[in-house]
Image: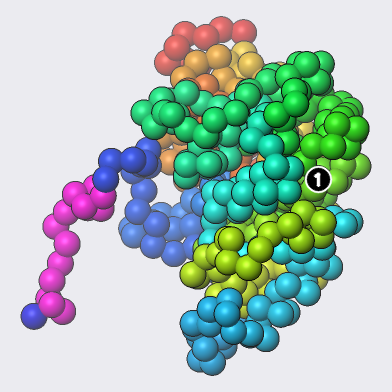
C-alpha cells in the first residue's frame, strides 16, 4: 500500500518555517553541477553553503562510505575504530602547527560550542570578545558570539560577558580587553556577513595581541578552511595560528561532521566526561573525512582554488567595470562576493531560471562558494549568465552607466 503513496504536497507542509527556500528541487549532482527533478542542469556556485568543497558525489567518498557501511556504522567514542584513527592522523597532518589535540562533533555550531567551553575552562574567565558581523552558529553559545541582532533578539539573555568590536579595528579590540576577558573569537574572513576581508596585517595583529595579553584566540574556519581561500587554512594567508580552530562544512563531503583543533595545554585542562557527543567520530563520517582529505591533497585542490578563484574574481571585476549596478567585488580563492546597489532577490531568481545557483548575504550581496573542482569553463559560463541577468536587472531598475 505504501509503495503506491505519492506526495501531492511539498516539504514546506511539514517543516517549521525557518529557512529561506529557493524554487528548485535537486535530484542529483556531480562535481560542480546539479540537476533538478525535471533534468534541468545548474552550475552550482552555492555548493550546499560551502559543504561540497571537493564536488558533489565524489567517487572516492562514495566508495569509502559504502565500504565502511558494510563493516560497521555505529562505534561510539568509548570504543576504538580504525577509520577514526586514520581520520585523526590525516587531520593532524594538515593541521596548523601546535594544534595537536582534536575533538569531534557533528556540525560547525557544535565545534564552536566545544571551543567556547574549552577556552572558558582553560582561561577561568567568562569574558569573550567577538566581532561586528561575526557569525558562528545558532546554538546557544554560538549564538551568543554571533553579531546579527535578528538571530539573537528572541533568545536573550544569552551568555554573559560577550562584547562585540569592529572587525578589522585592532585599537577597538585592544581597548575592550579587561580583567575578565579570556577569549577572542573571529572568522579570518567573515562569510555570512558578505565575504568581508580583514585589513592587511589585522589577523596577525590579533594573534600577537592575544599572545601578549594571554588570551585564547579561536579561529572559526568553518567556511574558510580546507583550501577555500587558496591556502589550506585562511589564517595561513597572514601567518597566524590560533589556540583553537573550528572546522566543519566540507570536511566529510556532506556527512555531518565538525572538528575542533586545540593546543595541547588547553586540551589538558579538560576532565573526563566534561564534554562529549554521541555521534562524534562515527565511522561513516570518519571514512568520508579520510576520502575528502585524500582528494584535497591528491588533486591539489588548494592550489586549484587559488588559480580558479583568481580567474573567477578577475572575471567578476570585469563585470563590475561593465555594470554600474555592482558596488563591489571581493574575496579570496573560491570564497567570493558581488555586492549590488539594490536587493539581489530578483538576480538570484533570474540566475535559477538561467541555470545558475548562487547564495545571498543579506539583501544586497551575492555570495559564491562553489566546489573547488569547478572548471574555468564553468566559471566562464557562470559569468556569461551573470552578465545577462545583471543587464536585465539594470533595465528593470533603470540603472544607466
Which residue is pictured at 49% across the width and 82% down the height? 74
Please state the extent of the stretch shown in magenta in the rendering.
2-15
> Between 200 and 73, which is closer to the camera in this rendering?
73
Residue nearest the observer in this picture, 226 or 179: 179
Front residue (pair 240, 278): 278
Q: Position of residue 338 (x, y in %)?
A: 62, 28
Can the viewer see residue 80? Answer: yes
- On the picture, is 385 further left or further right than 329? left
Give the answer, above or below, for where 135 lies relative to 70. above
Is 102 drawn above or below residue 127 in the view shown? below
Residue 351 on image: x %, y %: 47, 37
Instruction: Identify the residue at image location x=44%, y=58%.
Output: 35
Residue highlighted by disc 1 = 242
**Image point (47%, 42%), residue name:** 140
User: Where in the figure is residue 265, as x and y percent of width and height?
Assistant: 82, 56
Does the rendering let one see residue 43? no
Q: Is residue 380 left or right of residue 22?
A: right
Q: Is residue 137 left or right of residue 376?
A: left
Residue at figure coordinates x 73%, y 48% from the top left: 122
Find out whether residue 13 is within the magenta segment: yes
Report the side of 366 relative to 41 (left or right): right
Task: Please state, as top left, top right, bottom left or bottom right, where the C terminus lies in the image.
Answer: top right
Above or below for 364 versus 110: above
> Does residue 126 show up magenta in the picture?
no
User: Residue 34 placed where, x, y %?
Assistant: 49, 57
Vertical placement of residue 43 versus 80, above or below: above
Is 365 in front, or is 95?
95
Residue positioned most to the bottom: 71
Badge 1: few (under 14), some or many (20 or more) residues near its Cα, within 10 Å?
many
Q: Secondary structure at mark 1?
A: loop
Amino acid at each position: 500500500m505504501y509503495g503506491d503513496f505519492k506526495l501531492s504536497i511539498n516539504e514546506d507542509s511539514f517543516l517549521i518555517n525557518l529557512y529561506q527556500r529557493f524554487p528548485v528541487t535537486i535530484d542529483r549532482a556531480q562535481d560542480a553541477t546539479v540537476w533538478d527533478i525535471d533534468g534541468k542542469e545548474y552550475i552550482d556556485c552555492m555548493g550546499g553553503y560551502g559543504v561540497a568543497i571537493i564536488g558533489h558525489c565524489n567517487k572516492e567518498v562514495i566508495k569509502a562510505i559504502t565500504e565502511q557501511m558494510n563493516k560497521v556504522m555505529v562505534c561510539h567514542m568509548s570504543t576504538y575504530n580504525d577509520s577514526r584513527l586514520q581520520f585523526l592522523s590525516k587531520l593532524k597532518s594538515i593541521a596548523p602547527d601546535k594544534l595537536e589535540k582534536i575533538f569531534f562533533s557533528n556540525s560547525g555550531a557544535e565545534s564552536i560550542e566545544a571551543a567556547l567551553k574549552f577556552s572558558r575552562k582553560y582561561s577561568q574567565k567568562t569574558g569573550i570578545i567577538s566581532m561586528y558581523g561575526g557569525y558562528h552558529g545558532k546554538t546557544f553559545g554560538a549564538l551568543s558570539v554571533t553579531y546579527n541582532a535578528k538571530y539573537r533578539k528572541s533568545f536573550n539573555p544569552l551568555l554573559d560577558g560577550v562584547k562585540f568590536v569592529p572587525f578589522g579595528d585592532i585599537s577597538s579590540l585592544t581597548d575592550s580587553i579587561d580583567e575578565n576577558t579570556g577569549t577572542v573569537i573571529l572568522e579570518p574572513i567573515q562569510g555570512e556577513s558578505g565575504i568581508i576581508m580583514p585589513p592587511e596585517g589585522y589577523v596577525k595583529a590579533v594573534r600577537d595581541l592575544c599572545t601578549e595579553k594571554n588570551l585564547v584566540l579561536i579561529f572559526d574556519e568553518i567556511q574558510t578552511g580546507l583550501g577555500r581561500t587558496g591556502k589550506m587554512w585562511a589564517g595561513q594567508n597572514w601567518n597566524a595560528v590560533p589556540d583553537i580552530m573550528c572546522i566543519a562544512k566540507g570536511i566529510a563531503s556532506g556527512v555531518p561532521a565538525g572538528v575542533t583543533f586545540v593546543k595541547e595545554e588547553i586540551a589538558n585542562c579538560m576532565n573526563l566526561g566534561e564534554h562529549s557527543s554521541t555521534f562524534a567520530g562515527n565511522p561513516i563520517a570518519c571514512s568520508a573525512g579520510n576520502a575528502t582529505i585524500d582528494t584535497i591533497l591528491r588533486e591539489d585542490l588548494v592550489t586549484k582554488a587559488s588559480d580558479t578563484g583568481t580567474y573567477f574574481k578577475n572575471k567578476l571585476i570585469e563585470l563590475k567595470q561593465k555594470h554600474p549596478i555592482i558596488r563591489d567585488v571581493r574575496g579570496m580563492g573560491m570564497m567570493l562576493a558581488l555586492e549590488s546597489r539594490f536587493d539581489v532577490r530578483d538576480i538570484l531568481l533570474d540566475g535559477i531560471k538561467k541555470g545558475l545557483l548562487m547564495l545571498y548575504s543579506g539583501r544586497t550581496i551575492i555570495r559564491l562558494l562553489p566546489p573547488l573542482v569547478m572548471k574555468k569553463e564553468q566559471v566562464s559560463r557562470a559569468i556569461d549568465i551573470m552578465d545577462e541577468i545583471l543587464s536585465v536587472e539594470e533595465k528593470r531598475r533603470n540603472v544607466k552607466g
